[in-house]
Amino acid sequence: MTELGAAWRFAALGGVCAGLAVAPFLRASADATELAVAGLSAAAALASVVPRQATRPAAVTWLCLLALAFATAGIGVGVARVDAIGAGALDLEPGRRVAVVGHVAAVPRRSDGRVTVRLDTPDGRLLVESPEPVPDLRTGSAIRATGEIRDPLPWEASWLERQGITDVLKAPAIELGMGQRGGAISLLDDARARAEDALGRGTDDSRAALLRGFVLGQDDRIDQGTVEEFRRSGLSHLLAVSGQNVLLLALLAWPLLALLGLRMRARLIVTLALIAVYVPIAGAGPSIQRAGVMGAAGVLAALAGRPRSRGYVLLLATAVTLALNPRASGDPGWQLSFAAVVGIMLWARPIRSLLVRRDGGGGTEETTAGALRGALADGVAVTVSATLATAPLIAHQFGVVSLASLPANLFALPAVAPVMWLGMLAGLVGQLPWLPVEPLTFIAGALAGYVAQIASWLAAPTWAQVDLVIDEPVLVLGVCAALTVAVTLALRWASRRSSLRLAPILAIVAAASLATIAAAAGPSGVGPSRTNPDAVSGLRVTVLDVGQGDSVLLEPADGKPILVDAGPPEAEVAGMLAERGVERLGALVATHAQSDHVGGAPDVLDGIPVDRFLFARSSRRLRGAASAAGTQPMRVTAGARARSGSLRLEVLWPPRQRLDVPRDPAADPNQLSIVLLARWHEFELLLTGDAEAELAPIDPGPVEVLKVAHHGSEDAGLDGLLDRSTPTLAVVSVGAENPYGHPAPATLAELADHDVPLARTDLAGSLTIDVDRRGFSLHAAG
């Protein structure tokens, strides 16, 4: 390829990419097909008259004209694709009530107590949203829904536009229908369903959900607390099929193929074939297609010897993904994949060279040790390059940067490729249901659990993620340019130092990572959100005197306060928080939707900033109030975890299965009240909400303090709970002279029989428990 010939190809492909990218923002005056033909004709005409040899100024002029002609063709193709995608949308008047029947087009999204699912109907595409519980919805399955059409909200309009959707159907429920999609795509649906089933055999439900996220991009059944830990630790890309995942899968297979004696070209063909097989098994949806294309581009870019070849591969991948959907350039996932491939293209090879460089430059990678060394070097190089390259875009799109991202990804690296390999193999073997997959999924599940533990550890410090907003696109480009220059110069400097070895640097990174993990079990160094921090040296627990209701304030000295319930509205808990100098809450937990527990929640949400609103079941009104206040609503079930500084919270009740059944208006809401186990170092506190032990059979293990359930009402299961938990103190939040007779004589007698001292808000006012390393002490307001 001559220099001029290479420039021609770059100009042509770059012009196509530019045309496709700007097409969604233009309204062509001519027919899209005519525009594309005109551009291609102009490009052909230019190619036929350009001189074989041209001076540099003349060559630049011809290249600009050629790029413009191909950009015109790209605009024509892009406009045609945008029109074709938009033509498939269902477009109805807002407020209209309709009943729809269709097929699930993509993995549902579950968050904030609601489910959203893209639906293909005979009349067009739309988004259906419904509150939980909603059954498992497999891609391609038939569903029915009846509700009211609404326009997309401002924050979701651009995302839906990229999917070719203009309407949202608000439905009180989603029902499973009969049958699947027909045609050739049904074969992919069936293959994906068999892969899902295979990944669920041989491991527990939580690890099976992680495997489906890693391998198939299904994150809808992963616990929301786990999803949050992956996000804070910078590992959230593992829960969706991304270009980086595909690239790691392929590159780490490279040395194994070398050990089999395959030459370079054969290894490349097999690697790309692996990606081609993986994409349809993973569902072949738009995001999976993009991941496959970007992953293949990353492989070629990482292996290409010349920068020109790597750049050409990047442009080709860009053109393919934009031709599939010209609006993809506005998608954060596409932008992050693009940035990751650019980072890999620029930095993966020099980082790898520093990692595998030996004294004298000798050695081979055809031995087993060399292959493993090369695989590890490839993985580290890709991980570091992609993490650095995507950081500015993450700050732009999400307003945060994970400081734990690099160490978390490096610690998770040894498990990522095996999880993907074993998961893919299980999905393939699972296409024949009589073949056993349990050995594969057992090992893969254990590795997935290891990655989840890394995410939990490295998400724990409050400084694991910092707020960093880069608003303006120009500023984003400036930061990216500065980062590119700085990293490139640093790598060039390192490569010229023959005595420099990267092993000591990696040792420092590892030590820093271990220090971060250790910090997960200790103070985080970030002060609490309150104006009188002097009063709290360890953990302060305040059972607020709200009358006949519940509200418990947890204040770790090294984290943000957490409020569990907000009492009845007349208690004015928001004012109590202000009196105590609380300026921000890390979380507001609503144990269940009864006024004596959440009546004051709207005032709290309106009065001070709250990071997250945690609930198992909640009213739409309260979830809406949280969203309006800028608080992130999050549904939690048994097994979910949260943390603020050294304070850890674990949800013990209710289990997800109990929430997935249809809501019974006549059922006792106390049955699904959240039960929390709060841990601060060796101190443990059991917060039972209104879930009496006879309704919520839990085994928390020994605890120091028990908040007695349901204001001390009679509880047939209390005896067993006291035997299992052996508390040294019990507290009851109860109103003076309440009409219910709380606390019940039977409850008082049970506590006395177990020699458990009792403190009551109706007799002593607000109860304060101060905890430090030596133990805890109880103080009453009066």
Image: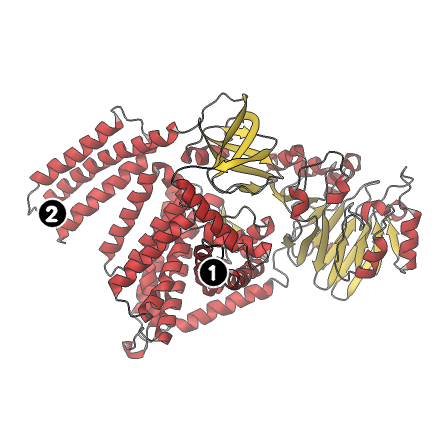
Q: Earlier in the sequence, mark 2 or mark 1?
A: 2
Secondary structure at numbered mark 2: helix
Residue 118 horizontal side relative to residue 378, left or right: right
- Measured as percent of width and height from the top left, residue 645 is found at 64, 57
Which residue is most to the front? 434
Tell me if residue 372 comes above or below residue 82 in the rendering.
below
Residue position marked by numbered label 1 in the rendering: 419
* Closest to the observer, 760 or 178: 178
Secondary structure at numbered mark 1: helix
- Measured as percent of width and height from the top left, residue 279 is found at 38, 50
Q: Are marks 2 and 1 in contact (CB under 8 Å)?
A: no
Tell me if residue 130 comes above or below residue 207 in the rendering.
above
Residue 719 horizontal side relative to residue 700, left or right: right
Name the amino acid type tagged 2: Arg
| Quadrant occupied by the N terminus | bottom left
Alpha carbon separation for disc pair 2 and 1: 52 Å
Residue drawn at the location 45% of the way across and 53% of the way down: 431
Crowding around mark 2 (Cα neighbors within 10 Å: few <14, some 14 to 19, many 20+) is few
Residue position marked by numbered label 2 in the rendering: 56
